[in-house]
Image (tube, rainbow, N blue to C red):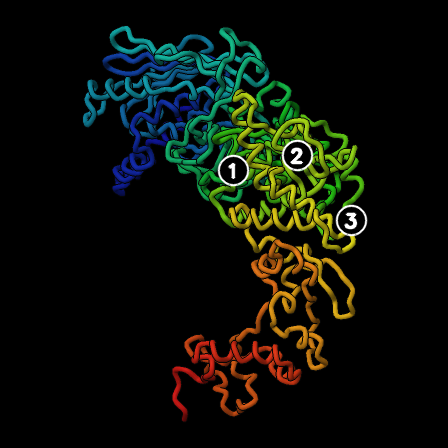
Amino acid sequence: MTTFDELSADRRAYVHWARKNGFEEGLRNLLSDLYPDNAHFIYELLQNAEDAGAREVTFDLRSDGLRVEHDGSRLFGLRDIDSITGIGQSTKKDDATTIGKFGVGFKAVFAYTQTPVIHSGNHSFAIHDLFIPVPVAAAAHRGRTTFWFPFDRADKPAQRAVKEVAHALRMLSSTTLLFLNNIERIACSLPGDEAVLLERVALDEHVIKIVGAHEDRRASYWYRITGDIEVAGKVCPVAAAFALDATSTEPTVSSKFSVKPAKGRVYIYFPAAKETSGLRFHIHAPFASTVARDSVRDDPGNDELLNGIGELIARALPAMRDDGLITDGLLSALPNDRDDLPGRYVVLRERIVDAFDSEPVTPVAGGGHARAGLLLRSSHAAIRNALSIEDANFIRGFAYEDDEPPVGWLRSADGRAGTFLNSLPAIDFGRDELLEVFEVVSGPGVVEPSWFVWISAKTDGWLRELYVALGVLSQEDASDPFAMRELRNVLGAAPLIRVWQGNDIDHIAGSNAYLPTAPDLRADRLVIDPLVIFDDEGRSKTREHRFLRQFYEIAGVRPWDQAAQLDIRLSNYRTQAASVTEDHLADLSALKELIDRRAVTPGTYAGMPIFVAVRHDGTRHWASARATYLDDPFVATGLTALYQSREYRDKPPSLLAPEYAKRSFDVAALAKTLEAISDLNVIRVPIGKNPKFEYSWHWDGRENHNMVDRDWVIPHFHAIVSTEDEALLRTLWRVVTTTDGACGDAVYPGGFQSP
C-alpha cells in the first residue's frame, strides 16, 4: 500500500467481503464484547495523545458530538491511518514504551459514532463502516491533532451519548495522569459551562502534584518511582506511586511530605479496572492484559515485570530514607505478612522485605536506620526501655552468639506499621530470650565474674528501672499460670538483687534476699534502701511502686519480718557447732510460735537442718526433722534398736538430741510437727513384691488403670522382728492392731475373672 486511495480501496474490498460472508455484525459484536464499558474510548484517546507526545489534551463535549484535540508532535502518517482503520496492525505493537500497542483500542469509539473524523498533519479523513478511510476537507490547527465524534448512532441517541460521555469525563480522577510521561494537562468542557480540569506538576525528581479543579478536594501529591527493566529482550518502563500527605501549607520537596496508605490499583498506564493487587500503593507496567486492558493475564513476562517493580521500590528506599519518608505512613503502605495478596503480587513483598534486611533503611528506636538483621526486636516495651543496645548485647552473650553484633532496637509501631516491622527478619529478644539468659547466668556452677562486674557498675536508679520492667513483664504473664511458674523459677534464681553483704554490696538470687521493713536497716542479704518502697512513701509513683512490688514478689524476695530474720539465723547453723544453746532454743520457740500463728507452714522447715541430732557413733550434727527420729527420753518407740540393727539396710536417721528433754520447751513435739520419725508405718505397695505372689498370675498385656493391684507392708519388718527389742515390738503390735483391717488383704486382679 503506497497511497491513501489504495488503502481506502483495500478497506472497501474488505468490508464488501465481510458483508458478503455475513461477518460484519459479528465484528461489531466482538468489539462490543471487548469494550463493555462504552466510555472506555476516553482512555483510548488519551493513549493516542500520550503516544504522540502530547502535553495537553482537550475534550469539548457538545450536544451533537465530542471534539478532542491534543498537541502531540507525532502527527498522523499513512502507516497510522492503516493502523487505526485495521485490527491488530498497530504501528506500536513492538514498542513496550507506548500504550497503544494492542491495535484494536481505537475501535471503542464506535460505541458512540459511526463516522469519526480525524485531522492530523497532512491528513483529514473520516472512517466509514469501521475500516474505510474517506478524505474530508482539512480543518486541523497546524501542528495539532483533532478528532470529531458525531453522535450519529441510531441505537444510541445523542442525548444519551452526551450523558454517558459527560459522566465518563467527570469520573477522570487525579490518578489518570499518574503514570503518563507526556500528558500534563487534561481540560474538558461540558454542556452548561461545566469544566473538568486535571493538571500534573513535578515538584522534584519524585514528587508530583495533581490538581483536579472538578474534584471537591485539595491537590493530591504522589511519590513516583520510575525505572526500566528488560523483559524478553525488550526494555520496559515500570513504576510505583505512593500517596503523600503534605506536612506544610506549600510543600515543594520530598522532605515536606509523609507517605500514607492508599487503595492500591494496577495500571497499564491507565487503571486496569478489574485487577486487584491487595497493595496500598499503585503500580504500573506494560503488563500483558486483556484487550480492554482491564485485568492482567497470567504470563511469565508479567511475573518478571512485578519482580522488577519490587526491585525498583527496593532501590528507591535509601533515597526515601534520606528524604525522611520512612515513617509509620510508608511502613503502613508497604505489604506485610498478614496482607492477603494475590499470588503474583507476593514477590513485591519479598523484594521489599529483602531490601530492609540488606540496606540500612529499617527504623531504629531512638533514631537512625540500620539493616533489619542487625536490630533486636521485643514486643515488650519495658525490656526495650530498660536495656540499652550495649546492655542487651552484653547479657545476650551469655546465651547467644552473633556473627555481627546488633546495633540497636527495632522501633516499635502500632497498626499496619507495626505489623510490617514485625515481618522483618530482626533478632527476637523478648521475654523468652531474656529468661533464657537469666537461666544460663543462674545455672549450675559458678556465675561468670563478668556478670557481677557488669551489674555492679549499674546505678541504683538503673537497677530499679530494670526491676520495674521485669515487674511489668510479670503482669503481662499474669493470666498464664505456666508462664508465671517459669517466671518465678527463673527470676527467683537469677543473681539480680542488690543487697548488703557485710559492709559491701552483692547481687544474689531473689529467693535469698529480703526487703527491709523500714529505712536504714542493714543486715546481710537485705535489699539496699534506694531499691525499696517503704510504706510511708508518697503516692506520686503509684505505677512504678506497683510493678516494683510485683517484681519482688515474683522473684521470691521476702519481707524482713520475724520469719525472715529467723530464717537467716537458722541458715547460719551450718557454720556453727551443733549444740543446744539458749539462743538455739529461742529460735525453735520462735518457729513454733510462727507455726501456731500460721505465719509460716511446717513443710517449709521440715527439710531444714535446725535440730541437734546424734549419729550412732555418738557425734552430734545439725539435721532436719525428716532426718531425725524420736525415742527415749522423749517417747519409748524402740526405733533406736531398729536403726542400729545390722538387718537395717538403709541409711539410718539420727536420734533427736536427748538434752532437749531437759528443757521446759517441748522440742520433740515441734520436731514431730516437722515430720520427725516417731512411729512405724503401714504403706501400700504393688502386689508383685509379695513373696506369695506367683508370676504366672500376671495378666500380661491386659492390666489397666481399672484393675485392683494392692498389697500392704511395714517397711523393714524383718529387721524390726529380729531386734527382739521389747519397746520396738510393742510399737509394732500397736501399729498392727490399730491399722484398718483392710490393710491385711492383698488383692489382684480387680475387675477380671480367673480363666
Cα distance in 3D space between marks 3 and 2:
31 Å
- Residue at 52% x, 49% y: name it: 596
The relative height of residue 202 versus residue 354 in the rendered view (above or below) is: above
Residue 504, image x and y in percent? 78, 33
- Residue at 58% x, 40% y: name it: 232
Secondary structure beneath dot 2 equals: strand
In this rendering, which labeled residue sits more in front, label 3 or label 2?
3
| Amino acid type, callout 3 | Val
Task: Mark 1 vs mark 2: give the one in front.
Answer: 1
Q: Which residue is mark 1?
A: 475
- Residue 261 visible (yes or no): yes
- Rendered position, 464 above or below 693: above
Q: Amino acid at mark 1?
A: Gln
Q: Answer above or below: position of 140 versus 371.
A: above
Position of 50 compared to 373: left or right?
left
Residue wearing tag 3: 446
